[in-house]
Image (cartoon, rainbow, N blue to C red):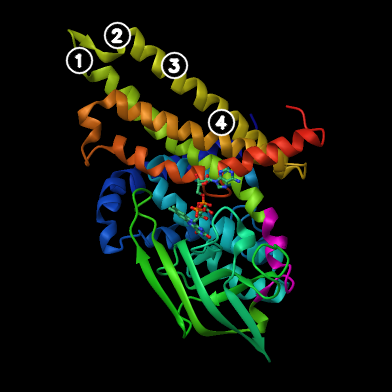
Amino acid sequence: MPDRTPEQDALRAEVAKFTASEITPNATRWDVEHADGAYPMHLFTRLGELGWLGIGFDEALGGSGGGPVERCILFEELAYGSAGAALGLYVHTALAAGALATVADPELAGRFVPDLLAGTTTGAWAYAEPDSGADVTRVRLDACRDGDHFVLNGSKMYITNATFADLILVVVRTSGQPGRLGGLSVLAVDGDSDGLTRTPMDKLGMRPSELAELHFTDCIVPVDRLVGELDQGFRQCLAILSQGRVFAGALALGLGRAAFDAALAHVGTREQFGAPLAAKQAVRMTVADMATRLHAVRHLVYSAAETLGSGGDYDTEASIAKLVASETATWVSERGLHLHGAQGFMLESPAQRFYRDCKVNEWGEGANELQREMIFEATAKGYRP
Ligand SMILES: Cc1cc2nc3c(=O)[nH]c(=O)nc-3n(C[C@H](O)[C@H](O)[C@H](O)COP(=O)(O)OP(=O)(O)OC[C@H]3O[C@@H](n4cnc5c(N)ncnc54)[C@H](O)[C@@H]3O)c2cc1C
């Protein structure tokens, strides 16, 4: 296990303490109040002040050092308190700031990344569209070059943080036809741009995070907002998405752990047939299986993080980690709810929240069927577990 240096243990303890005092006690309220647009915005500034948004970024851009293992610790522990709150922070730092820091030219990165890492501005990452889900080649949001700017027309859907984000990294088509990855570029678009409307979307889970549908109508974006090369920007961002699978795995692990702990506590105290539920062998087997699967996920996620941090070939490990972590979180959350019985079905119970929050991890950062395709392709090229 790579998360074992004294510094990493100290970080884990610090984030866990923060989660216990500032996230977990509010998680149910944030979940219920989402209809009012209640993303806990103060988390951006608090995590910025603590230096946690800057984990994994160069100090020159306002980063605070550390690498993938430290970032996994952060997202695992935050998601233990509220996966929805963690999702907004994940998109902001790992995807929006991550793509800018890695792919944009130094001037553009320097203009935006320090404020994002300080938490004084907020970011979003937008590639999904009504007709473009798992198949990104179908992106059609049109960005037509006109002198020193692009004119955007089209829409995006299901974009986390986009209701309030100051900066949205938008995947656009600058050439070619849907069905091709070439011709896709990335633009850093101001959230309050003229010609951009943002409509909130309600959803089943991850409710503290906010989701928006975006409509671009003759929206002007200066050419100097191009992130990476024209027509190649999305291709250049693929590594960010692949790395994101490791952090999404950590988020799913934190969520699964929360579901496990709640279930364990419940079966230890709920008495039926003259004894706690945990006295029943069938219940004990279920709890043991939950613990076993989460233990395996921990190893997969942190092994992938270590490979990524050491500059190794992490793609397949990242796919495996995200695949197993997300499906385990779903399974553990469902079993956890089952063990709670009717009590867990009540809206004030965290058990039903875990059950609703987990599902999206199976589509996010590439649908799990795509991960399976990639893992199979890797075996054909010689990968062996
Ligand atoms: C809470 C939430 C937050 C989100 N945040 C963002 C965000 O910040 N930015 C953003 O760009 N997008 C975001 N999305 C959208 C996300 O990118 C998409 O959900 C994802 O790309 C999958 O697309 P889709 O949902 O349209 O499903 P589809 O692509 O329509 O897939 C439907 C079903 O088919 C399966 N499937 C897909 N491909 C294959 C295949 N090759 N073989 C077999 N089965 C397959 C899928 O697993 C799924 O079960 C978010 C979605 C949600 C729900």
> Could you tell me the amino acid type at mark 3?
Ala
Q: Residues within 10 Å of mark 1 (few under 14, many from 20)?
A: few
Mark 2 residue element? helix
Mark 4 residue element? helix
**Residue beneath the point at 64% across and 72% down:** 173
Mark 3 residue element? helix
> Could you tell me the amino acid type at mark 4?
Arg
- Residue 279 circle label: 2
For residue 20, which quarter of the picture?
A: top left
> Could you tell me the amino acid type at mark 1?
Glu
Q: Which residue is mark 4?
A: 298
In the rendered image, residue 77, in percent from the top left (x then y), is placed at 47, 41
As drawn, the residue found furthest toward the right would be 382
**Residue beneath the point at 46% across and 52% down:** 87
Read off the magenta span.
226-239
Q: Which residue is mark 3?
A: 288
Is 234 in the magenta? yes
- Pointers 2 and 1 in contact (C-beta within 8 Å): no
- Pointers 3 and 4 in contact (C-beta within 8 Å): no
